[in-house]
Amino acid sequence: MKKIYFSTLFIFTFCFGAFGQCPPDTDITFTSQQEVNNFAANYPNCTSLTGLRIGVHNTPSDITDLRPVSQLIFVGSVVYVRNNPLLTSLEGLDNIFHIDGDLRIINNSNLNDITALSGLTYLRILEVTDNPQLTSLNGLHNLSDNMLRIAVTNNPLLTDFKTTLKK
C-alpha cells in the first residue's frame, strides 16, 4: 500500500510540478528582447512549450539574444524565428532536441549562424526563407530523415546545403 501511495504521490508531484514551472499558456510569442529576458526570469525551470514564436510576421523585433531561454528542450508544435533583423545567431536554442511540428526561420536579415540547432534531432517541417546573411545550414546535421517537407528559398549566400542534412 505504501508503494502505491508513494508512486501516486511521485507522479502527481512530477506532473503538476513540471507544468507549474511554465506559464499557463505555453504557446509563447516573443516580440522584444525584454520579453525574452522576462520569460527567463519568471520561468527559469520551464523546459517544454507548446509553441515558440520569436518575432512576428508584420513587425520587426528588437531581439538580439536568445540565451535567456536556453533551458528549453522540447516544443510541441512550432518554432518560428521570424522578422528579427538584429538577431545574428540562434544561440540559446542549443538544448532543444525535439520539435513536434515546424521549424520556420524566415526573414531574419542578419542571421548568419544556426549551429545552435545541432542538438535538434526531430521535426516535421523545415522552412528557411529570406535570410540574406545565412551561409550554411550547419547545425541541422542531426535531424532525422523522415521530415515531411523541407523548403529552403531566397537565402542568397547559402549555396550548398545537401551535405548538411542526414541522408
Image (cartoon, rainbow, N blue to C red):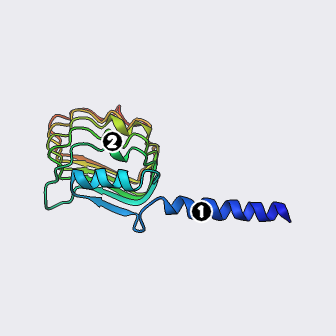
Quarter containing the N terminus: bottom right
Question: Cα distance, mark 1 to mark 2?
Answer: 26 Å
Image coordinates for residue 56, horizontal then vertical, percent: 21, 59
The foreground one among 138 and 70 is: 70
Identify the residue at horizontal 54%, vertical 58% (top origin). Answer: 18
Name the amino acid, label 2. Answer: Arg
Q: Is residue 162 above or below residue 14?
A: above
At 39% from the left edge and 44% from the top edge, which residue is drawn? 70
Q: Residue at x 48, y 58 (%)?
A: 21
- Name the residue nearer the viewer: 101 or 39: 39
Q: Earlier in the sequence, mark 1 or mark 2?
A: 1
- Please, what secondary structure does the residue beneath circle 1 have? helix
Q: Residue at x 70, y 63 (%)?
A: 9
Crowding around mark 2 (Cα neighbors within 10 Å: few <14, some 14 to 19, many 20+) is some
The x and y percentages for residue 122 are 46, 47
- What residue sits right under mark 2 in the picture? 67
For label 1, the residue is 15
Please state the horizontal and vertical placement of residue 113, each as a whole percent of the image: 26, 35
Asked where in the image residue 32 lies, by quadrant, the reply is: bottom left
Q: Is residue 30 visible?
A: yes
Residue 160: x and y, percent? 26, 32
Up the image or down, 22 lies above or below 98; here it is below
Outermost residue, front side? 41
Q: Amino acid at mark 1?
A: Cys
Q: Is residue 124 left or right of residue 128?
A: right
* Circle 1 Cα neighbour tier, 10 Å, few/some/many (<14 / 14–19 / ≥20): few
Is residue 80 visible to the viewer in this orientation of the structure?
no
**Relative to 83, does residue 133 appear above or below in the rendering?**
above
**33 with respect to 44 (left or right):** left
